[in-house]
Image (cartoon, coloured by chain):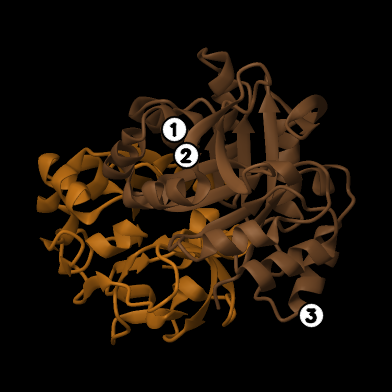
Chain colours: A orange, B brown
Amino acid sequence: MELVIVNTGCANIASVRFAIERLGYAVQVSDDAAVIKDADKVFLPGVGSAGAAMSQIQAKGLDKILPFLTQPVLGICLGMQLQTAFSEEGDVPCLGMIPTRVNKLQVGNLRLPHMGWNQIRVTQNHALFDGIANDSYFYFVHGFAAPVSDVTLASCDYGQAFSASIGKDNFMGVQFHPERSGTNGARLLRNFIEQC
Amino acid sequence: MLARRIIPCLDVRDGKVVKGVKFRNHEIIGDIVPLAEHYASIGADELVFYDITASSDDRVVDKSWVNRIAEVIDIPFCVAGGIKSVEDAGRILEMGADKVSVNSPALSDPSLITRLHDTFGQQCVVVGIDSFFDENSGTYQVHQFTGDEARTQKTRWQTADWVKEVQQRGAGEIVLNCMNQDGVRQGYDIAQLSAIRQSCKVPLIASGGAGAIEHFIDVFQQADVDGALAASVFHKAIINMDELKAALHKAGIAIRSGA
């Protein structure tokens, strides 16, 4: 199985790669359109700001291929957000594979960014969450989020309800960091590789 | 519910984990990677690695251990010490660290915080603050170069002012190390942490003073910190992680169970 991490130029690529390797799979990191198109599964990682990441993706010409991939794609954190239509963080149009948008979290007196371990609720029966119970903890670090909508696969609460995971067709995304979420995160990555 | 975090801190000197009392007299605790794996497996929520030699020695420090840690652990970790530039931070993050923490170099050049924020995003930028309570003046003062007794110095900053400044510059988290309490296991500085909490709108991590399970309960309940950092109580197995988390849970504090 060919697994490819899209080299978005963002900082968490190494930790995503190590997490996949811990599951016993080889994975390559690439920004080559041909390599990405030929992969069986594609990971789209990302940390940082949406505007900077979209600029990187456009500079590499990847905005021309990512929305048209037909194999399973898993966006992680900012990578998930980039799959939506639009991010309020810098008011940038994103790749648009999943019909939702990303807004600043409205958390009242709570601290931002939302940083730490929080519990999710699985809202759709999806292979990505196979064997993962409601109220399982995952590690989050973010200040922007997608609202709960009909593309929500799992939700989380921090001042407001938001999407912990979204998906449409072959495109999936998680707001949390499975590569840093202990055994639950490892299970989710394995589900994506073996069941999605 | 967002869980409070228990964060073992591993002070690193020359590739070994060490622990001193009040920042002094460091003794070797063990090798980094097996200790990191151990803490991840027993349910630590996050780890902090402080390269305590780096800032004060003014030398290039071998950070290849960051890569080795990232390979084996599946919880977030932060690297502190000797990060003086955007390039330094970039190398650490590329090796797989989730966050970088800056302390003395940010005091020398506060624009470092701004540049780290603009390059990597707020979520990567932790600012560590060594705060000393001066009994003569009754004020909390920020100290610099605390890794080296000969160079440790008081700065012009009072702690509350520096906390505000670093938030304005884009810090995503603040670790407040209360120097008077460090290593003596008499409890966290609840008074100081509560005061700083009022002006800290980003996650605040308590550091210095943990000696018993009650200290963790107190600091979460009374100072409303997001995480509690501790070293010797874990390294010396004075506190058992399972018992700590069970006690916090029983006290009604949101905490993650399991690994």
At 69% from the left and 33% from the top, the residue drawn is: B11
Q: Is mark 1 on a helix, strand or loop?
A: helix
Residue A25 visible, this angle: no
Q: Is residue A111 above or below residue A106?
A: above
Residue bearing the label numbered 3: B250
Three-letter amino acid code at disc 3? Lys
**Spot occupied by residue A63 in the image (x, y as percentages of width and height):** 13, 52
Going from N to C along the chain, the mark reached first, 2 or 1, is 1
| Numbered disc in front, either 3 or 1 | 1
Q: Which mark is residue B107?
A: 1
Label 3 and label 2: CA atoms lie apart by 39 Å
Q: Is residue B182 above or below residue A101?
A: above
Residue bearing the label numbered 2: B157
Q: Are marks 3 and 2 on the same chain?
A: yes
Q: Do tag 2 and tag 1 residues touch (Cβ < 8 Å)?
A: yes
Three-letter amino acid code at disc 2? Trp
At 76% from the left and 72% from the top, the residue drawn is: B248
Three-letter amino acid code at disc 1? Leu
Q: Quadrant of residue A131?
A: bottom right
At 25% from the left and 41% from the top, the residue drawn is: A35
At 54% from the left and 71% from the top, the residue drawn is: A118
Q: Quadrant of residue B112?
A: top left
